[in-house]
């Protein structure tokens, strides 16, 4: 089985810490929305969250708010198929990433959704800090793949010499510069981004590589052959 | 950091909520909402059993699993996961047992959260204790 975990393009600029982030959050249960909102408001400084409870709401709010930065949508909502909604959103808002949340942790479903263009899949039992990292990763242009799916993908995908482990090219660039001894500020200056953005890339790379520190992330990336 | 039962709670989720504020208000709000929402869902699940409506039952169990995940209620989440993955009509065989199991998991979660929120902060290390005593 070959899994599609190619890194996505990093053309969309990632918002800096001071930039306002507009999120459309859709789930038919208030408790899920409240829980995720609590996590977002506590971890992102300047955020506006739009609530939706079904697919129709999502499409209406999306067309009224073309400046939405990210969609976070429950895969199963009443009268709404997640894949259908994804297709419609991708047709109308191709540059806006879509993360699905779900109670389901079926690997085949996760894989299908990512293959169809979603930027992530977050099981509802995911801890708040991982949710934050996943949102950061997606805002930085990456794709969040749950650990269980990523491990399987790495075991099965032998078709490439250098598996990218879901890292974006930008994250690999940052890791490469860390490996060469550059500080966050120096990397920020080299890549012409803020040091917050560099930090976000590093955090996401650490998460994807299962590393607690920058040094460990570099080591793991080297072991995987991602960087020299 | 307090000691938590990892059979009952998703401990990393609960710890993350506790880290969000100093007095545990977020976790308390979440747990209160969870208690109300889960008990409402139990009523719906009972109705779906009475109506022999497997579709509604599955949907409600799915929703209960979702809110259990968000609230960090591991044991309830796992029970729902097992129930949801069944492809037969087994809920009809022993509904009272299933309802009791779900209710118990909710009670146990609420109790564990109450204990977590009321637990005294754990001391950093034995050295710290001795050091403080000497001073």
Image (cartoon, coloured by chain):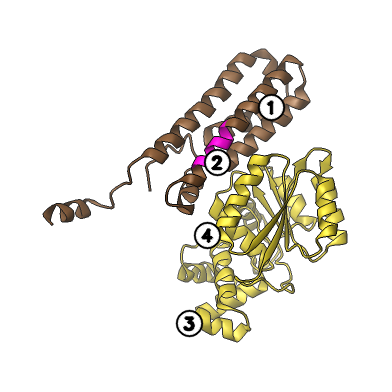
Chain colours: A yellow, B brown
Q: Find numbered disc 3 in the image and state the secondary structure of the residue it sits on.
A: loop
Residue occupied by mark 1: B86
Dot 2, crowdedness within 10 Å: few (<14), some or many (≥20)? many
- Give the spatial CA distance, label 1 vs label 2: 29 Å
Residue occupied by mark 2: B30
Return the residue nearer the eye: B80 or A169. B80
Q: Find numbered disc 1 in the image and state the secondary structure of the residue it sits on.
A: loop
The chain ID associated with circle 4 is A
The residue sitting at 76% across, 41% down in the picture is A76
State the mark number for residue A181.
3
Residues indicated by labels 2 and 3 sit on the same polypeptide chain: no
Query: Residue A208 occupies which quadrant of the picture?
Result: bottom right
Q: Find numbered disc 2 in the image and state the secondary structure of the residue it sits on.
A: helix
Which residues make up the magenta segment?
Answer: B28-35
Residue occupied by mark 4: A210
- Give the spatial CA distance, label 3 vs label 4: 21 Å
């Amino acid at each position: 089985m070959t899994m599609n975990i190619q890194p996505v393009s990093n053309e969309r600029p990632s918002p800096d810490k001071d930039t306002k982030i507009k999120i459309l959050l859709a789930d038919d249960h208030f408790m899920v929305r409240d829980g995720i909102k609590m996590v977002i408001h506590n971890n992102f400084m300047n955020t506006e969250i739009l609530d939706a409870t079904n697919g129709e709401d999502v499409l209406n709010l999306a067309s009224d708010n073309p400046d939405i930065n990210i969609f976070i949508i429950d895969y199963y909502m009443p009268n709404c198929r997640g894949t259908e909604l994804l297709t419609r959103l991708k047709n109308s808002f191709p540059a806006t990433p879509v993360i699905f949340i779900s109670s389901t942790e079926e690997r085949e479903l996760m894989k299908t959704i990512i293959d169809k263009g979603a930027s992530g899949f977050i099981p509802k039992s995911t801890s708040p800090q991982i949710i934050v990292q996943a949102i950061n990763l997606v805002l930085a242009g990456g794709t969040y793949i749950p650990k269980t799916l990523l491990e399987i993908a790495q075991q099965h995908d032998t078709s490439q010499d250098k598996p990218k482990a879901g890292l974006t090219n930008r994250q690999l660039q940052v890791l490469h510069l860390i490996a060469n001894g550059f500080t966050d500020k120096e990397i920020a200056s080299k890549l012409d981004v803020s040091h917050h953005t560099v930090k976000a890339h590093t955090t996401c790379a650490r998460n994807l590589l299962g590393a607690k520190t920058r040094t460990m992330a570099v080591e793991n990336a080297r072991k995987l052959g991602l960087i020299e | 950091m307090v000691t938590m039962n990892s059979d009952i709670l998703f401990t990393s989720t609960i710890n993350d909520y506790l880290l969000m504020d100093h007095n545990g208000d977020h976790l308390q709000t979440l747990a209160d909402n969870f208690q109300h929402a889960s008990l409402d869902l139990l009523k719906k699940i009972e109705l779906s059993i009475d109506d022999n409506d497997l579709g509604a039952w599955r949907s409600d169990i799915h929703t209960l699993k979702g809110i259990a995940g968000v609230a960090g209620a591991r044991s309830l989440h796992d029970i729902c996961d097992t129930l949801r993955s069944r492809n037969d009509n087994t809920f009809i065989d022993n509904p009272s047992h299933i309802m009791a199991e779900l209710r118990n998991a909710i009670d146990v979660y609420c109790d564990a959260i109450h204990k977590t929120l009321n637990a005294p902060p754990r001391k950093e290390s034995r050295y710290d204790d001795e050091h403080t005593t000497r001073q």
